[in-house]
């Protein structure tokens, strides 16, 4: 019999998620990075840096402990018969690139056509935070936001556009300044009707 038949499957993030390290382990990792960068983690100015970094990471990556379903769970059906486009534009966000772990930041524009009620306007800003406070790519974040709107609100259509500046291009690499990356995605009526797309772009601008 081939020994490979009963061999254990390779561990992957999908079937065996890595356990979250302890705070002490995280702080030790920060000290290692400081030393690798060429500084001395034992010098006075850096003694408390590992603790500060782990505390900051708890805030910067809080999105892993947040749920889009919880954010969008409460809707309002008494809207006086309103069924036209709802747009919240220029929602500021700060995220971290999953490739280099440096920031990218910008604004999100979110629109939807209600089907059975609306969600509180602040909830759309909170939805952006759910996905911005993770290791991200702008393309993935755009898709995650609109998918969450469709899954939890069931609108007749939705539109999402992100405009961001990426520090992995500004601080390193090509060091190109003032370059904006724009991503957008449409579903439902917005995907089917170019007039609705043009109306969305006009209102955003």
Image (cartoon, rainbow, N blue to C red):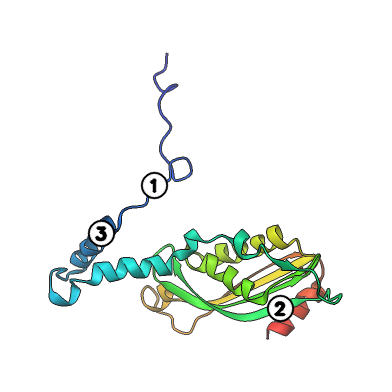
In the image, which disc is placed on residue 87? 2
Quadrant in which the C terminus is drawn: bottom right
User: Marks 1 and 3: CB-CB under 8 Å?
Assistant: no
- Residue position for label 3: 29
Q: Is residue 122 left or right of residue 35?
A: right
| Quadrant housing residue 138 | bottom right
Total count of labels: 3
Q: Position of residue 178 (x, y in %)?
A: 48, 85
Q: Is residue 102 above or below residue 199?
A: above
Disc 2 element: strand
Residue 149 vs residue 32, the one in the foreground? 149
- Point 43% across, 62% down: residue: 98
- Point 25% across, 57% down: residue: 24
Q: Is residue 35 left or right of residue 79?
A: left
Q: Position of residue 165 (x, y in %)?
A: 49, 78
- Residue position for label 1: 18
């Amino acid at each position: 019999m081939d020994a490979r038949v009963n061999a254990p499957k390779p561990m992957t993030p999908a079937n065996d998620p890595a356990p979250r390290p302890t705070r002490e382990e995280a702080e030790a990792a920060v000290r290692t990075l400081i030393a690798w960068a060429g500084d001395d983690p034992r010098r006075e100015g850096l003694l408390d840096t590992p603790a500060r970094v782990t505390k900051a990471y708890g805030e910067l990556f809080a999105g892993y402990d947040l749920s889009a379903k919880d954010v969008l769970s409460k809707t309002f059906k008494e809207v006086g018969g309103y069924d036209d486009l709802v747009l919240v534009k220029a929602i500021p966000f700060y995220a971290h690139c999953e490739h280099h772990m440096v920031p990218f930041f910008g604004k999100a524009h979110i629109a939807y056509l209600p089907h059975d009620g609306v969600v509180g306007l602040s909830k759309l800003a909170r939805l952006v935070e759910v996905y911005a406070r993770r290791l991200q790519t702008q393309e993935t974040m755009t898709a995650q936001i609109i998918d969450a709107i469709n899954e939890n609100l069931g609108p007749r259509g939705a539109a999402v556009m992100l405009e961001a500046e990426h520090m992995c291009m500004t601080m390193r690499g090509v060091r190109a300044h003032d370059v904006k990356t724009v991503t957008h995605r449409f579903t439902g009526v917005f995907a089917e009707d170019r007039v609705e797309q043009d109306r969305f772009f006009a209102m955003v601008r």
